[in-house]
Structures are given as structure tokens and as C-alpha cells.
Amino acid sequence: MTESTPLNAVVRGSWDPTAARPWRRKSTGAAEEPPLGKGSSSISSDVSSSTDHTPTKAQKNAATSEDSDLSMRTLSTPSPALIFPPNTQGFQNGRGSSTSSSSVTGETVAMVHSPPPTRLTHPLIRLASKHQKEQANVDRLPDHSMIQIFSFLPTNQLCRCARVCRRWYNLAWDPRLWRTIRLTGETINVDRALKVLTRRLCQDTPNVCLMLETVIVSGCRRLTDRGLYTIAQCCPELRRLEVSGCYNISNEAVFDVVSLCPNLEHLDVSGCSKVTCISLTREASIKLSPLHGKQISIRYLDMTDCFVLEDEGLHTIAAHCTQLTHLYLRRCVRITDEGLRYLMIYCTSIKELSVSDCRFVSDFGMREIAKLESRLRYLSIAHCGRITDVGIRYIAKYCSKLRYLNARGCEGITDHGVEYLAKNCTKLKSLDIGKCPLVSDTGLEFLALNCFNLKRLSLKSCESITGQGLQIVAANCFDLQMLNVQDCDVSVDALRFVKRHCKRCIIEHTNPAFF
């Protein structure tokens, strides 16, 4: 051992009490061996190959090429480059280092590791290695516990866990963990990620992924029709699809999904501005009977912010999705009363309906919605300025089991409409009549004397509300949990009265004297 021995060759903690200086190994220039099972993957690798590229075999092949400067090993695991943003840097795991090479587009193509050196056999090193293994208590957990832990991980982290070792690889690809794929991020190459993942999941059942039931890729702006077509082709058992905010997908891709996934029940295309209707493809329509509309089993449909949706598109949706129970059309500004008439002809099982900010919906539309009768439990008509007490009377008369009503910003509603609503919908639990300047303490008195189960009440910016009306509500609705009186002229004493009688009530207010 010479004085020129590199400091990084000293083994930490290897102090010989009988010697005057710590023990040092010879400087062989070899780095310590990286953890077992660490490898790298290439985007261009075919993860659906039938060859068993497990982490252990990859390490064995790399160890036999000690003469080479660099060794690149490929695993049958989707590369993190598919799932993480393109600017993901090379990672360091333990004491082994890695570097990454990039393509012209900036996406990571491969991660290259240094070749594993000869194993050091000094007794003190073996003792330290044994001590480190004893500290890895996670390896003592049984398989079912590990699978339970993995079930809480998102898709990208689960793919990384599959790269740790052989055991984690087998556990991470357990079919029970792949009933759901959840990808988020604006820069992620979703089309490529879905293609790689579905190929790997179809390994045991070629071309068909039977275990996948839920795909959530909300906010992935790079998702295109190609990615949805991959899901439609490979996942016939799909039951839930959420692509909210993916504005690059079109009607054709959605048609493919609903045609090739007959069990689809939950569809969220909110913010997809190019989607104008939901229907079967022409080929699927020809193969089915004239009543092919009943073949689409969608029950939950969210088309919020689908600005291009018109009455004709809503007519098509209603004719093909007759089993709808939840429909949300928030800010579909081109919908009119005529579209709601089409909807009520075919979809008679709707329980929740939202037409918030549909400014062309009026009292005639409320008359159509009232045909749902006792099946309707949730209704949102916020900021529909053409709705007045007449429309509220229609809803109150026929929809007696209504539980939730959002009528914020409907300035045509007065105390008479609130009175009729309170006397007929006595099981009302949540009511929002904020920004209705014609509602006063008289309307609150009718609510307090009839709707004893009221839990949430919003009176924001109701200029005619005073503390007297709030006290009447608090004295009768003991289960009140949320009260919004922001921008209302109410006294501190009235707020304290509410707090004293409704112990669990959270009060949202703008009175600086009350805290």
C-alpha cells in the first residue's frame, strides 16, 4: 500500500484496532458491485418478446463481458423514459451510477451502466454486506403484503419497482396490480406508454388484456387518437376511461372505444373540445340490430367544457346511451331546451344532471327535466339566467326526492320559488341559492320549517338576507354542516347564534369581527 492510494479505496468503518491506521484494499481500479437486479431499458426494446429478460439474467450476461468498457442491459419492463418527463436525468441508485443518452427529440432512449467488477472477498467487506442485508427488513415481508403495498403506487412508480430485483419484478407484474393504469403529466408520451404497457400486460393472453378495467390519463395533452385506439384494441374488459383535458382526441377515437369495449360504464371526456357526440362506429352499427343504441352500457358521462356539443350531438348521445344515470354538461354553451327534450325521450333513468352555465336553458327545459320525476336526486342549473320560479315549480312538483339543487346565479328565483321547493322537496340536503338577490328571510323561514335534514346551505351574495333569517335556520336545522354567507349583511351575534346551535357547522363569511 503506497501513499498514493486513492481515498475512495478506503472501506468505511473497516478499522483494525491492532493497527495504527485503517485497513485499505489494493487499488485495483474496480468499483463496488451494484445491487442485484439493477438494469437499464431502451425505449426501442420490445417488451412483448417471449424471451425471459428478467433482471437476474440481464446481470449475468453483463458480468461475462468484463473486457468491454460499457454494458447495456435490457429488461422486459417499460422504461421510465416512457412514463416520466423527457428531461428526467440519469439516476443514481445505491453506489452504482448511470448515465443517459437522449434522442433528437429530447426523450431518454437508454440508460447505460458500468460493467460489474470482480466481487471483493475481504472478510470485513463480507461482514458489512451481511449487516446491510439484515437491515433490509422489507425483504422479509410475505408476497401478499408486498402486493398490498404496491397497490398504492401509481403506474410510473410500479414500473420502477419492477426493476429492483427478480422478486420485485414478479410481484410488480402481478395481474391484481394492473386493473388500473393511471398516467398524468403534460409532457408524457402517453401513446407510447400505453402501447408498451398493454403489450406487456398481453404477454399471457396475446393481443388481449383481460385484467385491465380502468384507464385514467387525465391532463395528458399529448394523448391522441392513436393511444385511445390502442386501448380499444387491447382492453375489451375496460369499464372506466378518464381522458379529461386531453383536447387532441376526436370523435373517431371515442367511437372506437365505445364500440370495442362493450362493458364501458364510466366515461369522462371533459375538456375534450373536439368531441361532439358519443356513438358506435359505422361498422359496429351495421353488425348490430336496429336497437344497437342499447349496446352502449355507459352510465356515467362527463362532457364538461365540450364547447362544440350541440342539440344534435346530444340527441345522438341520448339515442345510443339509454342507460345513463349520471350526465354532466357544464359549460356546454350551445345546448338548448330542445336538446334536453331529446335527452328525456331516451334517458329516463338519470339520477344526476348538470346543465350549469348553459345560458340557453330556460323554464321549458326545466319542464322537460321534471319528467324524470322521483328518479332525479341531483340537479345543477347554476348561472342559467333564463330560469325563474316557474322552472323551480316544475322541479319541485314532480321531483319530490330531490336531494341536491344548485341554483346559484339564477336571479329570477324569488321567495315564492324557494317556498314551493321547501314544501315539496322536504328531503333536501344541499341547496345553493347564492347570488339570488330576490331571496330574503321569508324564503329562509320556509326552508327552516320544512327541510329539517338540510346539511349544506349557500347564500353567498344574497343581499336581502339578514341575521334574523339565519337564526331561524339554525334553530330548526340542527344537522347543518356548512353555511356560506359571504358578502351578506349579517351581524356577529347571528353568526354566533348559528355556531351555538349547529355545533358541527362550518361558516364561510366575510365579517372580520367573527372568528
Image (cartoon, helix red, strand yellow):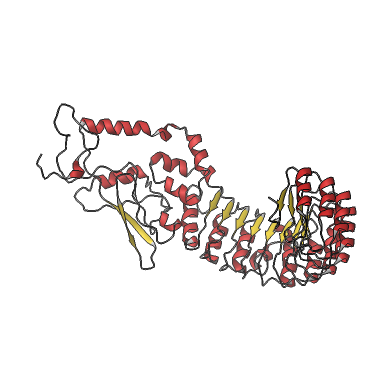
Residue 208 seen in render: no
Residue positioned 21% across, 41% down in the render: 118
Quadrant occupied by the N terminus: top left
Where residue 370 appears, as percent x and y from the top left, is 85, 60
Number of on-image labels: 0
Left or right for 246, reference 482: left
Comparing 234 with 250, the one in front is 250
Comparing 430 with 175, the one in front is 430
Residue 389 to residue 429: above or below: below
Comparing 245 with 46, the one in front is 245
Left or right for 251, reference 442: left
Residue positioned 43% across, 35% down in the render: 138
Residue 482 seen in render: yes
Residue positioned 56% across, 47% down in the render: 179
Left or right for 479, reference 288: right
> Within the image, what quadrant is residue 99 found in?
bottom left
Residue 386 to residue 135: above or below: below
> Within the image, what quadrant is residue 383 found in?
bottom right
Where residue 174 appears, as percent x and y from the top left, is 49, 42
Q: Residue furthest top?
A: 18
> Within the image, what quadrant is residue 81 found in?
bottom left
Where residue 7 appears, as percent x and y from the top left, is 18, 44
Left or right for 436, reference 186: right
